[in-house]
Amino acid sequence: MIPFNGDPSGVQKSLQYDVFWQPGEGRARCSLALKPQLLNRSGALHGGMAVTLLDAACGIACEAAIAESDNSEGHQQGVVTVDFYTQFVSTCHSGVVTAEAEVTRCGRSIIYVRADLRDDQGKLLTTGTGTFKRLNKPSARSELAEQG
């Protein structure tokens, strides 16, 4: 995988996780070094942080799949989460956690993804499956018409 070259999201800037993707293969990885502010009251990775990292990896995996399947030049698409199901398997208290996501089906409007979150020893922490919807970026002509 290679570093993701898109603009970082506000969440990525805030949490400071690293993003990698494999354009054309629908795969992505997000890694996050744990800090005290990301832990719950028990000192373990907060469940919301686990879900956030899984969702981010899945969204980037969708973008990687679209990069392969959308051949129209200059046409950019993004995605939004329609639903996301998680299973908390285990937890960790320190180190680096990594979410690995892979698109399982990429349709014209809906994309299905699965992901695993593991600690730096490879122990499975959380799994996730999600459904994402493609969003077409408005064309310049549409934007001008709305302004006009």
Image (cartoon, rainbow, N blue to C red):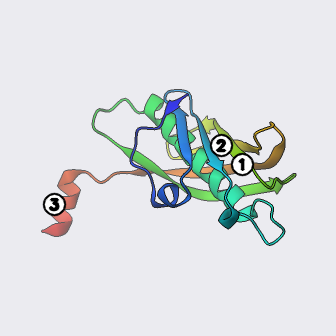
Label 2 Cα neighbours within 10 Å, binned few <14 / some 14-19 / many ≥20: many
For this rendering, which residue is in front, 75 or 13? 13
Separation of residues labelled 3 and 2 (CA atoms): 35 Å
Residue that badge 1 annotates: 129
Residue that badge 2 annotates: 113
Separation of residues labelled 2 and 1 (CA atoms): 6 Å
Q: Nearer the viewer, mark 3 or mark 2?
A: 2
Mark 1 or 3, nearer chain start: 1
Please indicate whether residue 52 sits to the left or right of residue 148 in the image.
right
- Which quadrant: the C terminus? bottom left
For this rendering, which residue is in front, 76 or 124? 124
Q: Position of residue 117 (x, y in %)?
A: 74, 45
Label 1 Cα neighbours within 10 Å, binned few <14 / some 14-19 / many ≥20: many
Q: How many marks?
A: 3
Residue that badge 3 annotates: 144
Q: Position of residue 137 (x, y in %)?
A: 34, 51
Label 3 Cα neighbours within 10 Å, binned few <14 / some 14-19 / many ≥20: few
Q: Quadrant of residue 18?
A: top right
* Residue 107, numbered circle: none
